[in-house]
Image (tube, helix red, strand yellow):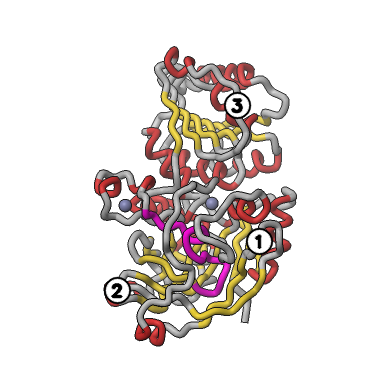
């Protein structure tokens, strides 16, 4: 998830609900809280929120750090819930307790979607849960995953098969552990939804502008559906990593004009008898330069998926969409029903997590935020709770 939205909810950080539930669910949560913009996150203890009938208490195995978290802490992006708040929306873990309507989940290994639609309103019923006005976004609407435990709705949880009880043990032949699967909740699922919407499939040509966390997984997902994949970035190390993981062509686009890049891709496609129209272009850099480049790559019938977020503006000739009979579309989060297919690709080893993530103890959260902000990390950090 790349930004905040200005909808608000009335959910309380700490539900004070009925006394029975509060008594039953007496788990003490150790969590890092954001109390004010730019201030270091503070370790606190608090009782877990009371479980509503459809809620679960998840013991966090891992929580990925997203640029959206940096936006909340450093860039004055407002959280929908008032501060203090525990951030973190890329959560995997094990269900330890559940409300009366969700007891089937107890003991299950799960990934918690970053966007949890209500499933019941008009837009949800029409398959548009991404714009559900009462959607729940952990670490924004309620306390998130930079904690030992999190209380979230059970609806939308993605069950992880093959879990043996050890959060650090490899699942299936993928070698990936439950903790690392946290990145499914945003970095993997967000480009997956964009790919689904674009109609990309076998024989198609996909171009990713920005090969960082989200774009890097997007490249692998596009390759997994049988497309030829082009990765564009300004960082040679990132491009080299993707050359071994799904990218058929990598181009360092630093100081390159969009028109030149488009010509280079077109020539490459022609040589290989790949599509020369209807490219699926995904803007995953979240920069103005990347957006300008992505728009400049449009060809006839192209699809432009706007996945990254920036507050900056770009100057484009919007009529190119008309001239090329092309489409441009944004994408917010990922519908929970799309998670299992992405998880399957990971567990089958077709989308690799390990080369693109690195684990850190959660107690080093402030150092990790700073390092990420200063672009000192090549991989997406996953924080492992180590607070006593
Ligand atoms: Zn995110
Ligand atoms: Zn809804």
| Residue indicated by mark 2 | 104
Measure the C-alpha gap from mark 2 to mark 3. 49 Å
Q: Is mark 2 on a helix, strand or loop?
A: helix
First to last magenta residue range: 134-149
Measure the C-alpha gap from mark 1 to mark 2. 38 Å
Residue 85 in sight: yes
Residue with the most extreme top position:
323
| Residue indicated by mark 3 | 314
| Residue indicated by mark 1 | 36
140 in the magenta segment: yes
The residue depicted at 54 percent of the width and 18 percent of the height is 266
Image location of residue 203, percent across then percent down: 40, 29
Marks 1 and 2, the one that precedes in the sequence: 1
Marks 2 and 3, the one that precedes in the sequence: 2
Residue 163 placement: quadrant: bottom left
Front in this rendered view, residue 226 or 291: 291
Lateral position of residue 4 relative to residue 343, left or right: right
Nearer the observer, disc 1 or disc 2? 1
Residue 90 in sight: no
Nearer the observer, disc 2 or disc 3? 3
Q: Is mark 3 on a helix, strand or loop?
A: loop
Mark 1–mark 3 CB contact (< 8 Å): no
Measure the C-alpha gap from mark 1 to mark 3. 31 Å
148 in the magenta segment: yes
Image location of residue 185, percent across then percent down: 47, 56
């Amino acid at each position: 998830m790349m930004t905040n939205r200005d909808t608000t909810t009335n959910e309380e950080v700490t539900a004070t609900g009925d006394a029975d539930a509060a008594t039953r669910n007496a788990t003490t949560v150790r969590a890092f809280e954001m109390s004010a913009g730019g201030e270091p996150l503070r370790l606190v203890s608090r009782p877990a929120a009371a479980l509503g009938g459809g809620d679960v208490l998840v013991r966090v195995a891992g929580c990925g750090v997203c640029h959206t978290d940096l936006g909340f802490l450093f860039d004055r992006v407002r959280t929908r819930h008032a501060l203090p708040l525990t951030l973190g929306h890329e959560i995997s873990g094990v269900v330890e307790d559940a409300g009366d309507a969700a007891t089937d989940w107890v003991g299950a290994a799960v990934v918690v979607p970053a966007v949890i639609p209500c499933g019941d309103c008009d837009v949800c019923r029409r398959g548009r849960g991404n714009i559900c006005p009462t959607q729940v976004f952990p670490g924004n609407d309620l306390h998130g995953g930079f904690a030992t435990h999190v209380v979230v709705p059970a609806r939308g949880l993605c069950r992880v098969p093959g879990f043996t009880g050890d959060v650090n043990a490899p699942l299936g032949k993928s070698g990936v552990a439950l903790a690392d699967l946290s990145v499914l909740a945003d970095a993997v699922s967000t480009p997956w939804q964009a790919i689904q919407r674009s109609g990309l499939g076998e024989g198609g040509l996909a171009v990713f502008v920005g090969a960082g966390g989200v774009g890097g997984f997007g490249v692998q997902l596009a390759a997994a559906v049988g497309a030829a994949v082009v990765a564009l970035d300004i960082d040679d190390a990132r491009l080299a990593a993707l050359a071994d993981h799904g990218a058929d062509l990598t181009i360092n686009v630093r100081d390159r004009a969009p028109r030149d890049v488009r010509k280079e891709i077109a020539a490459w496609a022609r040589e290989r008898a790949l599509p020369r129209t209807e490219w699926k272009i995904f803007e995953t850099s979240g920069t103005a330069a990347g957006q300008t480049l992505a728009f400049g790559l449009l060809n006839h019938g192209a699809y432009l998926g706007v996945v990254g977020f920036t507050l900056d503006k770009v100057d484009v000739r919007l009529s190119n969409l008309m001239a090329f009979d092309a489409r441009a579309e944004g994408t917010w989060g990922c519908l929970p029903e799309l998670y299992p297919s992405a998880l399957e690709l990971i567990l089958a080893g077709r989308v690799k997590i390990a080369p693109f993530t690195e684990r850190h103890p959660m107690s080093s959260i402030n150092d990790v935020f700073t390092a990420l902000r200063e672009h000192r990390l090549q991989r997406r950090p996953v924080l492992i709770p180590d607070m006593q």
